[in-house]
Image (cartoon, rainbow, N blue to C red):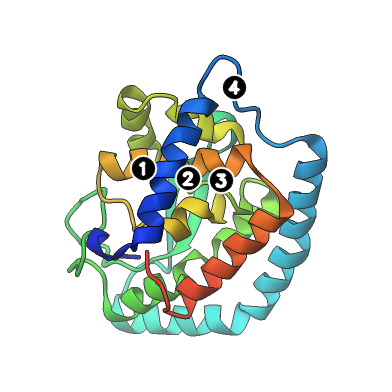
Amino acid sequence: MTLSIQKYNHNTIEISKKNEFAMKKTVSKSQQPIGYTKFQYFQKRMVDLIVGGSLFLVSLPLALYTVYRTRKESPGSIFFKQSRIGLNGKAFTCYKFRSMHEDGQFNPYTQENDSRIFAYGNTMRKMRIDELPQLLNVLKGEMHLIGPRAEWDILVKDYEKIIPNYHDRHLVAPGITGLAQVCYPYGRNVEDAKEKLKFDMEYINNWSLWQEIKVVYKTIEVVLGKRGM
């Protein structure tokens, strides 16, 4: 989903500055990030299976409508499949509903008012409908409902060369939504990736059920259009 970076509010900037300090603490020798404990992972996996499975069934009518609209507006494949990086840096195939024309010009970053996106594709991105097929990745155990964004393997190779400690975000499986996704605009460059990494590490190192609930609430705000990404 697109949103001009100028639109994120003062609270987001304050969180970003606070997380910059947290990030420095995270990468220190005395406090290396360790991912989830076994009990935390168990809690997340139960949420993935119960909530994810329920969402999968409830969203089937919307998924069928999405198939109809996509075929009508942009002939071609329904699903967009891409190699993304998951837990411990392992690549997996991530599924999404295709929101761009298949003959669009290549660009690894989505731009504001991107001409490659067809009309209903824009709606899908704003309401995160294009993410629904990732529930299959969640049920397979390749992703969580909540966690760091699953990034394209090509971008990850570049990020790990120029962003210190970028690989630390792969200590946990990625999520459909997450703290970085709801607190920072859609990434368009390396600098955005650096900022979002701070939110990812804040989430990983301070995980709690309460934080999980807050991310869900902020995600609902995004879906309802009160905030953008």
Label 1, label 2: how many angstroms apart (C-alpha)? 7 Å
**Residue that label 2 marks:** 199
Mark 3 or 2, nearer chain start:
3
**Residue that label 3 marks:** 174
Horizontal arrangement in the rendering, residue 5 relative to residue 17 (left or right): left
Element class at badge 1: helix
Label 4, label 1: how many angstroms apart (C-alpha)? 19 Å
**14 or 185, nearer to the observer:** 14
Q: Amino acid at mark 2?
A: Phe
Q: Amino acid at mark 3?
A: Pro
Camera-nearest label, 4 or 3? 4
Q: Amino acid at mark 1?
A: Glu
Q: Position of residue 109 (x, y in %)?
A: 26, 51
Q: Position of residue 188 (x, y in %)?
A: 26, 50
Camera-nearest label, 3 or 1? 1
- Asked if one can make out residue 46 in the rendered structure from this viewpoint, the answer is yes
**163 or 87, nearer to the observer:** 163
Label 3, label 2: how many angstroms apart (C-alpha)? 13 Å
**Residue that label 4 marks:** 32
**What quarter of the picture does the C terminus occupy?**
bottom left
Vertical order, 214 against 221 (above or below) = above
Q: Amino acid at mark 4?
A: Gln
Vertical order, 82 against 115 (above or below) = above
**Residue that label 1 marks:** 195
Mark 4 or 3, nearer chain start:
4
Rendering quarter of residue 185 = bottom left
Mark 3 or 1, nearer chain start:
3
Q: Position of residue 179 (x, y in %)?
A: 52, 53
